[in-house]
Amino acid sequence: MRDPSRRTYGPAVARISSQLGQPMMPHQRYIVDTSLEVDPATHALVYRDVTVLLPRQSGKTTVTLPVKVHRALAFPGEVRRHAPYQHGRQRILYAAQRRQDAREKWVDDQLPILEASPFRTRYRKRLANGSEALIWKSGAYDGIVSNTETAGHGKTLDLAFEDEFFAAVDARLEQAFSPAMITRWSPQHWRVSTEGTEASLYLADKVAKGRELVESGEQTTSAYFEWSALEGPHNDPATWLACMPALCPQLTGECVCGVDDTGRRWWRHTVRMAAVRAELGKMGPEEFGRAYLNRRKGSTLPPDPNMPTPEQWADRLDDRAAPGEPLAFSIDMPPSRAATAIVAVWLCEIERCPSRREVDGVAQAAPHRHGKVIEYRPGTDWVAARAGELAERWDPVAWVIDGASPAMSLVPDLAEVGISKSTNTNEPERGDLLTLNAGEAAAAAGAVVDGIRHDTVRHEGQAALTDAFNNARTRPLGDRFAFARRLATVDISPWVAFAGALLGLELRKHLAEPDDFDPSAFYV
């Protein structure tokens, strides 16, 4: 996320983009403002690695070209100011699927924009095949390179772009570029692309790592940007608007989204609804999804060895278990905040469980934990009121929210209905809110996985929970794992809430007072 406390070169790049005749749309401004943040201590760029995943026709050139121009014009002076020990010109390289693709993009798309701009006198161009480059009067070199293992070898490198890197077969460019940047002040390696196919393993690795980085909130030297719609009907304009930042929401007429109150135009959307509908008519769902919704073509998530098997999940079905005491609730939602899940988990004593397992004719000695999705509805505005009703009716031992979940925004609203964190962490009271830290989230994930595997946790086979289980994947968290909301192709919040409620039950079950529990009300 953008850190407003840091200075950024973003506004300067945006001015260059306007001078190139391509005023930046808001998402483009966000990309450059964030990726070009400056470390106040070193005056160097915060991010050495920038990955941008955008649908087709979302203005990738309008981002890459002004970043290159700014590097060529401004950074020679910045180096003299902040890194006078560094020698050599600023060197910029651009790569695409093949060298010929890079040349065509450079000559046919980028160079005409520069030639029609005020910058046309600031460089000389060299177009001889095999040695194409712009030599800027500042001394900067801007050229193209092939997608090979030797690309960029032998010379230092300050700024590199991999365009449409979904076609990259491996990390050969990264392995070539990174050593060339290691001694340079404020280098950056940009990757810009639309989603790929099942063969796009290099891109898939970068997307997975980027999503994990965003999920964790960890501060690193990598910046990751993604606009995609992994959920929702592919033919629904609401789905398009959720992931196509260049799409104007107006159905007819000229786009006025970038016009201020005085009538001055600052920017405009470049894609219209009618054009997207035309593309929808030409393309199949999978091709359309990849091009415009950033859905990977032909890909399915591989089995996760950390997850129970579908067979184990199916064997834990128990739709006749009556609620027991104690009981805990958990709340979760996806990053899109499109829906919210409330899940309950309770102890199911042997005598209360009609489907209890028997070994040699004898019922198992230990009770199991039973989970049920209580509510799973679109939006968030209903959650606090419903939670208040459930709290009054059931008197749970705990309410649980993962501290890294988007559902943390509901904490103030929950406090309004009497559900809040204990002021005494050593002696929590029944019904207090428990917000899980990273270690506790990992413990919750491990507990629900072990419970399903070892038949100590069961469920009612509800579609929302089963669908979430089938699509849930894990992400590393030290030597442990947590659930990765952004890696799933559907909303897994019911599954995450299931895990949270299970841990909340285990941590707070000692607070139960078994005298005032009426299980019959659950099925009214």
Image: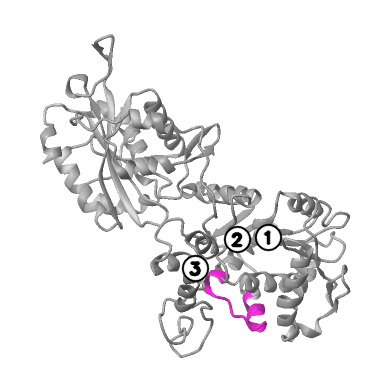
Q: Are marks 1 and 2 in contact (CB under 8 Å)?
A: yes
Task: Please report the bounds of the magenta region as a residue range.
Answer: 14-29
Mark linked to residue 52: 2
At mark 2, the secondary structure is: strand
Q: Quadrant of the C terminus?
A: top left
Give me the residue at 51% from left, 46% from top.
300
The answer to which of 282 and 40 lies nearer the viewer is: 282
Mark linked to residue 190: 1
Task: Give the image location of residue 12, x and y in percent.
Answer: 65, 75
Q: Residue furthest bottom?
A: 263
Magenta segment includes 399: no
The answer to which of 482 and 9 lies nearer the viewer is: 482
Real-space Cα distance between discs 1 and 3?
21 Å
Task: Give the image location of residue 200, x and y in percent.
Answer: 63, 51
Real-space Cα distance between discs 3 and 2?
13 Å
The answer to whether residue 86 is seen in the rendering is yes
